[in-house]
Amino acid sequence: MKLLAIDQSFTSTGLVLLEDDVVTLALKVTTDKNDDIYARTWTVIKEILTVIEQHRPDAIALEGLAYGGTGNATRDLAGLQFALITHLRYHHNLDISIIAPTQVKRRATGKGNANKQQMVEALPSEVRALFDAIGVKKTTGLQDLSDAYWIGITARELNDALCK
């Protein structure tokens, strides 16, 4: 089964395609901060659609919104998530799992309040080596790919648990 895990963001969306827990694709999507929020939303969605069309995942996993967040950035991310889910659900008929941020952090590190660096440090060595090999660094999307990886792993385990 192919699972596309997405850590959605306007700065750097992380996309990781998992096939039986093996990373077969890792990439990031960035947007132009000078564009308005609607253009940035469409840029993220178009790039994700390209990946979906090329790799045909069976399911999608997204990180849910942090409920403690406030301000424009939180509202904008909610808008991005709404637009993305609506498009994926009604135009591509894909199964979509939304995983709570605390679940993702707990799966990766054993605690629900892990920071970005702890999430990266928890990566399996072969996954970290893959991310390093494609040239992703802390300042260029490593944390977003790390989050996407853990979103996918968490979604897969939760779905497996539900199926038993």
Image: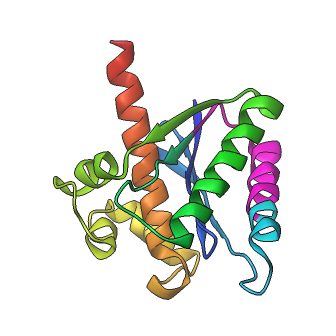
Our reading of the magenta stretch's main secondary structure is: helix
Q: What residue appears at the point 60 percent right and 73 percent down from the top-left corner?
A: 12
Q: Is residue 14 visible?
A: no
Q: Is residue 25 left or right of residue 48?
A: left
Q: What residue appears at the point 21 percent right and 54 percent down from the top-left corner?
A: 112
Looking at the image, the residue that sits furthest to the front is 71
Which quarter of the picture shows residue 78?
bottom right
Q: Is residue 71 visible?
A: yes
Magenta stretch holds residue 47: yes
Q: Is residue 86 left or right of residue 163?
A: right
Q: What residue appears at the point 40 percent right and 56 percent down from the top-left corner?
A: 66
Which quarter of the picture shows residue 42?
bottom right
Along the line of sight, the residue nearer the viewer: 5 or 38: 38
Along the line of sight, the residue nearer the viewer: 25 or 11: 11
What is the x, y in percent for residue 91? 83, 33
What is the x, y in percent for residue 96? 58, 33
Along the line of sight, the residue nearer the viewer: 106 or 84: 84
Residue 147 position (above or below residue 92): below
Looking at the image, the residue that sits furthest to the left is 110
Residue 107 position (above or below residue 27): above
What is the x, y in percent for residue 10? 64, 71
Q: Where the N terminus falls, by quadrant?
A: top right
Instruction: Tell me which segment is drawn in magenta.
Output: 44-60
Q: Where the C terminus falls, by quadrant?
A: top left
Q: Is residue 83 left or right of residue 99?
A: right
What is the x, y in percent for residue 16? 56, 54
Along the line of sight, the residue nearer the viewer: 17 or 76: 76
Residue 87 position (above or below residue 58): below
Q: What residue appears at the point 51 percent right and 64 percent down from the top-left corner?
A: 74
How was the colour assigned to the protein in this rendering?
A: rainbow
Magenta stretch holds residue 61: no
